[in-house]
Structures are given as structure tokens and as C-alpha cells.
Image (tube, helix red, strand yellow):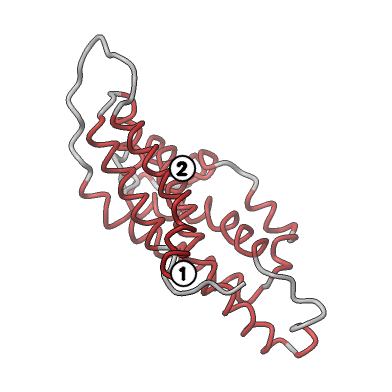
Amino acid sequence: MALARVRRRLPGLAVWAAALLGAWLLPGHLWHSEQPPDFPFPAILPTLGAFLLLIVLAPITVLFAGPRLARSRSLSALEAPPDFIWGLLLLTLWPASAGPPGWGAWMLALLLSALPGEARWLAASLPPEAPFPSAWGPRAARAWRLGALRRLVPRWIAARLPLWITASLILERILGLPGLGSDWSARVSIRDHAGLTIWIAGFALLWLLARPLERETS
């Protein structure tokens, strides 16, 4: 059993190993060499806070709304505007007396831009509920969803977290805040092999932790 579980993880591990090798051997040459940027440590807590809110709010929304949320027109209207629209709207409505927008404004814009899409992603991934457990009532349906979300959420986080960090770059640029997305982008642009390797190793570890070692039921 243990050997079978390891074999199931081999293709994914091979992909991450290739990504690590590619980051370390990233081709290209810069005419003007630059030093790697300092890591934006002040951005860690706001970023973790925004991601934790997203991780809590999206599954709770899906738990009560169910798979029908994936076909919601109102959700589509909220999901349609790109990230920079939310950032520009926040800048437009931000009162001048409050000073420049900070990390709190960034967290709000990120949640507004990401929550509708992530809720739809989770809702579309739920198993069908018709005819059962819908026929057993709302309580049974919520229990069914809760069991499905317990298995789905870790994989959702591992699959989407790299995209959240990359998408946060747009809001960081609009609001003038040096964050994790900007750090990732800067290290790509200057061919910081060591920094990119650490980033990708972190993503690979997250992917591995999101795949529980217990036996997966079909």
C-alpha cells in the first residue's frame, strides 16, 4: 500500500523536480547584472491574512450554496471584472484624508477579485447531489458537501495558491506595495536562480502536504 501511494506521487514529483531544475538552469543573460531584491517580510502577514480569509470564506460560501453556485449569474457578474478593475475602483473611492492605501486596502481588493472565482471553482468541483442526497433534505446535503470539501480544499489550496500569489502582483503594482507577487516577478526578471528555486521548492512542498498519506477512496 505504501509503495502504491509513492508510485501515485511519482509523476507529480517528477514535474516539480523538472521545475526546480529549470529554475536553477534558467537560460538567458542580462547585460546589466542586478542584485536579488530583499524579501518583502512586511508583506507576509497581510498576505497570509488575505489568503486565510479566502480559504475560510470560499468553502463556507459553497457549503451553504451548494453546486448551484457554479451556475449563478450574479456570481458571474462579480467574477467578470479583472483584478486591476478592483484596484482602480478602490483607488477611486479611497478618501484622500485617509492617506495612501495600505495592506488593508490590498487585502480588500484581493478578496473582492478572488472570492467569486474561487467559490465557483469549488462549487463546480463538488459531486452531483441529485437525486441523492438532495432528496434527504438540506441537512443531509450540507453533510455531503462538508465531506466532499474536506477532501477537496487541501488540493484546491495547493493548486490555486501559486496563482493567487501571481495575481496579487497586479494589485501590488496599482497600490504601490512591494509584496510576494512583486518579489516573484523581480526574481524571474533578473534570473535569480537561487530565489526562484526556493519559491518553487515551497510550492512543491505545499503540493506534497496537500496530498494526504492516508488511503484515497474512490
Residue of label 2: 167
In the rendered view, does 61 fall on the left or right side of 187? right
Q: Quadrant of residue 52?
A: bottom left
Measured along the vertical axis of the image, is residue 66 above or below residue 95? below
Residue nearest the observer in this picture, 132 or 85: 132
Specify the amino acid type for callout 1: Val
Residue at image coords 80%, 87%: 135
Q: Quadrant of residue 211?
A: bottom left
Q: Position of residue 9 (x, y in %)?
A: 45, 56
Q: Position of residue 49 (x, y in %)?
A: 34, 61
Mark 2 crowdedness (10 Å alpha carbons): few <14, some 14-19, many ≥20: some
Residue nearest the observer in this picture, 127 or 79: 127
SS label for mark 1: helix
In the rendered view, does 101 fall on the left or right side of 109? left
Mark 1 crowdedness (10 Å alpha carbons): few <14, some 14-19, many ≥20: few
Residue at image coords 82%, 80%: 131
Specify the amino acid type for callout 2: Ala
SS label for mark 2: helix
Residue of label 1: 56
